[in-house]
Amino acid sequence: MIWYVSSKAGSDASDGRTPQTAFKTLQHAVDVAKAGDTIAIAPGAYDQDLPLRVSAARAANVVVAVAGSE
């Protein structure tokens, strides 16, 4: 499963399954992702400790990648 995150256009009330329905926060994506999943992060400003969240995801065997550019 690929989970999408966009600080600009996302909402944690969305399902996170497409770029158009992306989550707003990386933490929400980390909370729903399972081992073997991928989190695709859109470029943007994130008000959270991004390196800590990425490390937590990777420790849970979740791939984290930057999705394109805007």
Image (tube, rainbow, N blue to C red):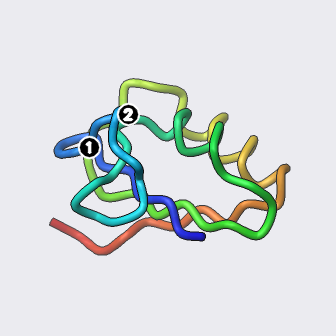
Q: Residue at x 84, y 50 (%)?
A: 59
Work out how far the residue at label 1 is from the one at label 2, CA to CA, in angstroms. Answer: 7 Å
Q: Nearer the viewer, residue 19 or 69?
A: 19
| Disc 1 to disc 2: CB gap under 8 Å | yes
> Mark 2 = which residue?
12
Q: Position of residue 67 (x, y in %)?
A: 37, 70
User: Quick check: 7 above or below 21?
Assistant: above
Front position in the image: 49 or 4: 4
**Measured from the top left, where is residue 15 in percent x and y?**
40, 49
Left or right position of 14 against 62: left
- Tell me residue 64's x, y (percent): 60, 62
Quarter of the image where the N terminus is located: bottom right
Q: Residues within 10 Å of mark 2 (few under 14, many from 20)?
A: some
- What secondary structure is marked by label 1? loop
In the displayed structure image, the side of residue 26 where residue 37 appears, left or right: right
Q: Amino acid at mark 1?
A: Gly
Residue bearing the label numbered 1: 10
Q: Give the SS element for disc 2.
A: loop
User: How many numbered marks appear?
Assistant: 2
Q: Amino acid at mark 2?
A: Asp
The part of the image, by quadrant, that contains residue 4 is bottom left
